[in-house]
Image (cartoon, rainbow, N blue to C red):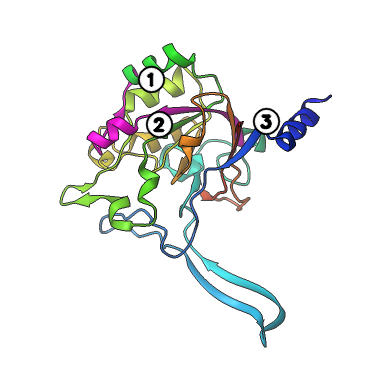
Amino acid sequence: MSTLTTLLTELTAGALTVVDLSQPLDPSTPVIELPEPFAQSPGLTIERISQYDDNGPAWYWNTLTLGEHTGTHFDAPVHWITGRDLPNNTTDTIDPARFIGPACVFDVRSEVAENADYLLTVEHLEAWEEEHGRVPAGAWALLLSGWSSRGHDREAFINADEQGPHSPGFHQDTISLLLEKRDILGIGVETVGTDAGQAGTFNPPFPAHNLVHGAGKFGLASLCNLERLPATGAVLIAAPLKITRGSGSPVRVLAIAPS
């Protein structure tokens, strides 16, 4: 049998399962909040066009208003200034083959339970590789923090105080290693953005965005169900909307994993 036939056979037989890694998208979905004087990205607004009524007796549909980076979403390289001049850096020009790659899941739930600002360190990554093998080229590096359990509770999800938001992420040195030594496809997190909550105070600020997009790689934010994936062995598919010159889009992220 061909590889694709085998894939379909194993899905039908239940040897493989499809895991939805996307949060439900509705008007209560938390979005990132920037300090003044920066412009804000809106949350989702839904306006009904018709629903089996005088405006459309046999059909139901809505108008959606939202920012590109709302809910579970994809960040293209052009999203950040470091990636603005790269070739094929927008959602409509990225090679679609690059939306698919093996998933490497780094479980930091116990560390985050003790410290909401926890950053995945190089030492943690190296210990993971000793157990699971080297992160392969073209992989999605995914941070399993447990943050998605906060759901659509905006206050808990943003987790801000007078110092700003507090949420976990990747350490700058870890990002550099993953990009330069492992040639990953991108990073994914359960939090509202790919940078840690306090990343605005880092040097450079927002290293996940700066480094990942400057390298022509991608980001995924507001993921969920990462605990249903093995540390290795799953394949992740994250295809953004084909928006002309798009910096990103809401996305349905799916993983194919052993049952």
Give the image location of residue 85, x and y in percent: 50, 38
Comes first in the chain, label 2 or label 3: 3
**Magenta segment boundaries in residue numbering:** 99-122
Up the image or down, 234 lies above or below 159; here it is above
Q: Looking at the image, can residue 57 be seen?
A: yes
Q: Are marks 2 and 3 in contact (CB under 8 Å)?
A: no
In this rendering, which labeled residue sits more in front, label 1 or label 3? 3
> Dot 1 surroundings within 10 Å: few (below 14), some, or many (20 or more)?
some
Q: Which residue is mark 1?
A: 125
Q: Which mark is residue 211?
A: 2
In this rendering, which labeled residue sits more in front, label 2 or label 3? 3
Q: Nearer the viewer, residue 11 or 88?
A: 11
Give the image location of residue 4, x and y in percent: 77, 30
Give the image location of residue 74, x and y in percent: 51, 45
Q: Which mark is residue 15?
A: 3
Q: Amino acid at mark 1?
A: Leu
Comes first in the chain, label 1 or label 2: 1
Give the image location of residue 235, x and y in percent: 60, 31
Q: Nearer the viewer, residue 108 or 240?
A: 108
Comes first in the chain, label 1 or label 3: 3
Outermost top residue: 130
* Residue 118 placement: quadrant: top left
Question: Label 1 to label 3, Cα distance in Å?
Answer: 29 Å
> Dot 2 surroundings within 10 Å: few (below 14), some, or many (20 or more)?
many
* Magenta residue check for 114: yes
Q: Amino acid at mark 3?
A: Ala
User: Is 43 positioned to the left or the right of 48 in the image?
Assistant: left
Q: Amino acid at mark 2?
A: Leu
> Dot 3 surroundings within 10 Å: few (below 14), some, or many (20 or more)?
few
